[in-house]
Amino acid sequence: MKKVQFEQKLKNLTKQLTRRKFILFIASSLMIVLICLLLFVFHNQKPSVSHSKTSQSSSQVTNQPRENKDYRIQYSDSSLIKRTTLNSALKKAGLFDFYYLLNTSDDGGNDAKILVYYNQANQQLVFKFYQNGYQSANDYQIGGYDLQKRTGIHGLQPSAFNNLPLVYTWENLQTK
C-alpha cells in the first residue's frame, strides 16, 4: 500500500507541478508582454521639450511666410520662358521653400535676395544668391539648374550670367 500511496502522491505532485508550471508560464508571459508594452509606450512618448517644439511648429504652420509681407517675387521677360516651367524648376531647385530662404539660423538659407537668369541656348537657369548683410553687388554666391537634365549645376563662374536676361527676382522683406 505504501507503494500505491507513493505513486498516487507522485501523480498528484506531477499534476500540481504541471499546473504550477502552466500558471508560472502564463504569468511570466503576461509580465513579459506588459514590460514590452510599457517599454514601447515610454520609448515612443515624446519628451516635454519636444511637445513645445510641436506647438511651435503648429504655430509656424499658421505663420507661413506670405508674399508681399515677408518676401516679394517679380517675374521679368516672361516671353522667354513659361512661368509654369520656371516655377517648376525653381521648386525642384528648392527656391520655393520660402520658410527656409527666410530662416537666418545656421541651417537656413539666410537669403536677402535671389536673382535668376535664363540661358535660353543651354536651357539653364543661373542663380545669384545674396545673403542677409551683403555689402555690395559683388557679394553673392552662384548656383544653377539645368532644365533638360533636371539637375543642379555646380561650379559656375561669375561670367555664367553675363548678358543673360533676368527672369525672376525673390527679395526678403523681413530684413528691410
Image (cartoon, rainbow, N blue to C red):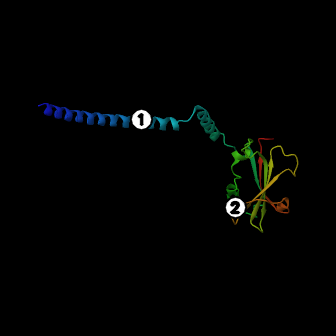
Q: What mark, if any, has residue 151 been given in the picture?
A: 2
- Report the amino acid beneath label 1: Leu
Residue at the image point whose x is 33% and y is 34% from the top: 24
Judged from the image, the secondary structure of the residue bearing numbered disc 1 is: helix
Q: Nearer the viewer, residue 106 or 22?
A: 22
> Height in image: 141 above or below 164?
above
Judge left or right: residue 61 versus residue 147.
Answer: left
Q: Earlier in the sequence, mark 1 or mark 2?
A: 1
Name the residue: 71% across, 64% down. Answer: 147
The foreground one among 132 and 13 is 13
Q: Is residue 8 above or below residue 119?
A: above
Going by the image, does 134 lie left or right of 54? right
Residue 121 shown left or right of residue 59 in the figure: right
**171 or 24, which lies in front?**
24
Residue 34 — which label?
A: 1
The quarter in which the N terminus is drawn is top left
Residue 33 rendering spot, x and y as whole percentages: 40, 38
- Where is residue 89? Give x, y as percent: 69, 59
Q: Is residue 114 above or below residue 53?
A: below
In percent of width and height, residue 14 lies at 23, 36
Q: Which residue is outermost to the left?
A: 1
Which residue lies at the image location 35% right of the left edge and 34% below the top edge?
A: 27
Q: Secondary structure at mark 2?
A: strand
Q: Which is more foreground, mark 1 or mark 2?
A: 1
Q: Position of residue 38 (x, y in %)?
A: 46, 34
Work out whether residue 68 can be spotted: no
Name the image quarter holding the C terminus: top right
Q: Is residue 133 visible?
A: yes
**Mark 1 crowd level (few <14, some 14–19, many ≥20, 10 Å Cα):** few
Q: How many marks?
A: 2
In space, the residues marked 1 and 2 are separated at their CA atoms by 51 Å
Residue with the most extreme bottom position:
121
